Amino acid sequence: MSQPVADPTLRVACVQFRPVLGDVAANLEATCDLLAAARAQGADLAVFPELSLTGYFLKDLVPEVAISLEGPEVERLRRAAGGLLALVGAVLETPDHRFHNAAILLGEGGVLQVHRKLYLPTYGLFDEQRDLAPGQRIQARTVRLPGRVPWRVGILICEDLWHPSAPYVLSRQGLDLLLCPSASPAQGVQGPDGPLGSAASYTAMTRTYAELFTTFLVYCNRVGYEDGVQFWGGSRVLGADGSLLAGPAPAEPLILTAAVDRGGLRRARIAYPLLRDERPAIVAAALGERGGELPTDD
Amino acid sequence: MSSPLTINPALVAGILRGFLAEETAKVGFGRVVVGLSGGVDSAVVCCLAAEALGPQQVLAVLLPYRTTDPASMRDALAVVERTGVRHRVVEITAQVDAYLAGVPEASPLRRGNKMARERMSVLYDLSLAEAALVVGTSNKTELLLGYGTLHGDMAHALNPLGDLYKTQVYELARTLAVPEPVLAKAPSADLWAGQSDEADLGFTYADADRILYHLVDERRRPAEVVALGLSPELVATVRERMRQNQYKRRLPLIAKLSRRTIDRDFRYPRDWGY
């Protein structure tokens, strides 16, 4: 009897969500409903925006909205996800009471992976380092869904993308699908026909990373307003050659889906064998000499 | 080459309509009250609010004093007609004059401030009667220069224009249903006959906006702004006005005593729970 052939595709869904600021119970309810809606649209993987269970500009609300991996909220999400893979944003409290801006990947009946945001922006309108602790680890992992080929998945949250070392490291760990939850505020309206400044930056970064690291990329930004600041949506799915498979979505609550196919990944890596040709030893040697420190005056 | 202040008006209008719709709806209000002066700022706010919420959800209030230029009323009514919003005329002469009769020595500035605060008082009364939020019309130029009355026109719940310079408000206005006479006339607070903002300020909005844009948005040093071809005296004047009026842009100072003082180390978003 021949082995059934594993399905090389995965249907991903960006859930462009508008959380209620500081109301975890309300956002948890909405998340469970949206997981059901994503499943009804045939999704295998549902990606929610950064801090989707809490909202973004939390300030002193951070300790009040924090949950733990062992708490009832994650258990509720695990049950709601069922056979679906789901990436949900939350403030996670460590046993020693540090608070992380985290993305939790649920699937295979439990928590598969937690990414804690590495780079906490603290400039301009951002103030994350005041309230949150930075993550310490970048780790891609293999995800297996029944009847599907395995996928190497990496997670980076919003500002993490502004540091190209982060997707670089994931790429060296093996990366087929980069998931990027985001809460990017709208800023920069210059130029008579110009795009939104924030959108232009993410369009450039996501395209560049998908193309140069030859990886599928899912960018899920939130929508809605907090204290007068708009989150501009623009969620999208990119192919491993940098092409747009779906989106950018308009700035309203919606679910955007697209199928990713390993055939596309293979073709991109044949056309552009950048992964094969990369020379990490040169990077390691160059950084190793100084530990990556900037030059000093001496 | 276009000015660095040039905006994409369609993009801006979309963000501002969403701002008005969401920031009113999520706190349980579907309606707004706007003081309509006949000038460009309140005309733009009226247009955006009518588009965002529907004209029936917008109450435009015309608040003339006996010295108000009749052309202002005519222009304000043209905005009402073009946008289809509801409107009311509430004359403030009686209450303002009742107070000013007791202070005959009051300067034009004091008289103007009194009028601005009476208007605010009427708008907030109607806001309660209408279950509607007061939407402000102060632009970024006015806010940075302190060219507004504290607890007068600077008092409101939401401000869609506070991050647009005056010249950018005009750019936006030209793409909205703002009547031509509103766009054509010289900006004026209309606190006394023949008043002109630019005469009051002693410089043009075009110059002020260029200087403020480079100082504030681009964070250039004053010498770098002068090097762009702007007068050193004017750069210094504008920067000093911005510094002197910082207090108007902040809540009152609270004397710190405890370990958690409101707005210093008690920091919650205004949209807490919304």
Image (tube, coloured by chain):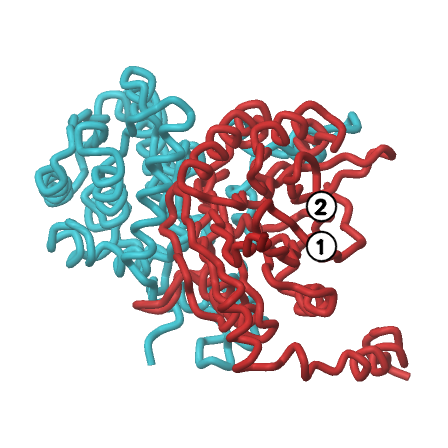
Chain colours: A red, B cyan
Q: Which residue is denoted by mark 2 in the rendering?
A: A113
Please tell me whether mark 2 sits on a helix, a strand or a loop: strand
Task: Kindly give the residue lying farthest to the front in the view shown.
Answer: A1
In front: B55, or A74?
A74
A51 over B31 or under it: above or below: below
Q: Which residue is denoted by mark 1 in the rendering?
A: A141
Q: Could you tell me which chain the residue with mark 2 belongs to?
A: A
Q: Residue at x 33, y 38 (%)?
A: B112
In front: B171, or A257?
A257
Query: Do the numbered discs 1 and 2 sit on residues whose CB atoms are within 8 Å?
Result: yes
In front: A10, or B79?
A10
Residue B160 position in % (x across, y down): 36, 44
Q: Is residue B54 left or right of residue B218?
A: left
Cα separation between marks 1 and 2? 8 Å
What amino acid is labelled 1 in the image?
A: Arg
Residue B256 position in % (x across, y down): 74, 30
Q: How many marks?
A: 2
User: In the drawing, what numbered circle is on residue A59?
Assistant: none
B144 over B250 or under it: above or below: below
Q: Residue at x 21, y 43 (%)?
A: B47
What amino acid is labelled 2 in the image?
A: Gln
